[in-house]
Image (spheres, grey):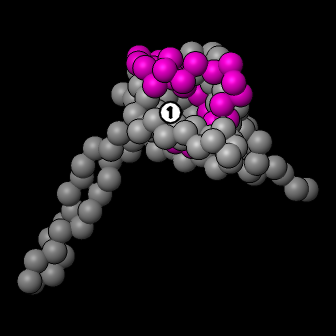
Amino acid sequence: MGRRIGGILFLKINGEGFPAKGNFTYNLGAPKREGIVGADGFHGFKEMPQVPFIEGAITDSGDLNVQTLLNIQDATATLELANGKVITLREAYYAGDGNITTEEGEIAIRLEGASAEEIQ
């Protein structure tokens, strides 16, 4: 039996829906590990923290206040995926560069936060 894996998704910030467009990326903020080697071989690894984030694009439908979007701080963002998972980003803030394209009214969005979790 086939199961939906990808496709439709929903982005909400403080409970308000935004018109999600295309492909989104997220990171739960797990530590990033990197190997350490010397002239004599493998020594071990280091572990560095990462900032949790949700990143993608939304459509400017005309009634969206872009300045309000750019000023988002201390928000809760959720990304509801086609496979049933929900990604929750807490204490989120807008961390994008504010680029907007006019051909399709596309706004690049990057939200970073203090913590993230995946709910299945």
Q: In the image, is residue 75 part of the stretch drawn in magenta?
A: yes
- Nearer-the-camera pick, 63 or 74: 63
Identity of the residue furthest to the bottom in this view: 40
Residue drawn where x is 28% and y is 44% of the image: 49
Q: Does residue 102 appear in the picture of this structure?
A: yes
Q: Which residue is mark 1?
A: 117
Residue 62: give x, y in percent of width and height: 69, 24
Residue drawn where x is 66% and y is 38% of the image: 105
Q: Amino acid at mark 1?
A: Glu
Mark 1 crowd level (few <14, some 14–19, many ≥20, 10 Å Cα)? some
Q: In the image, is residue 79 part of the stretch drawn in magenta?
A: yes
Residue 109: give x, y in percent of width and height: 52, 37
Q: Does residue 110 appear in the picture of this structure?
A: no
- Nearer-the-camera pick, 66 or 6: 66
Using residue 110 as the reference point, say whether residue 58 is left or right of it: right
Quadrant of the rendered image containing residue 18: top right
Residue 26: give x, y in percent of width and height: 52, 44
Number of numbered discs: 1
Using residue 81 as the reference point, say whether residue 67 is left or right of it: left
Residue 95: give x, y in percent of width and height: 40, 34
Q: Which residues are magenta?
A: 54-81
Q: In terms of secondary structure, where does tag 1 sit?
A: strand
Residue drawn where x is 24% and y is 67% of the image: 35
- Nearer-the-camera pick, 1 or 63: 63
- Nearer-the-camera pick, 60 or 43: 60
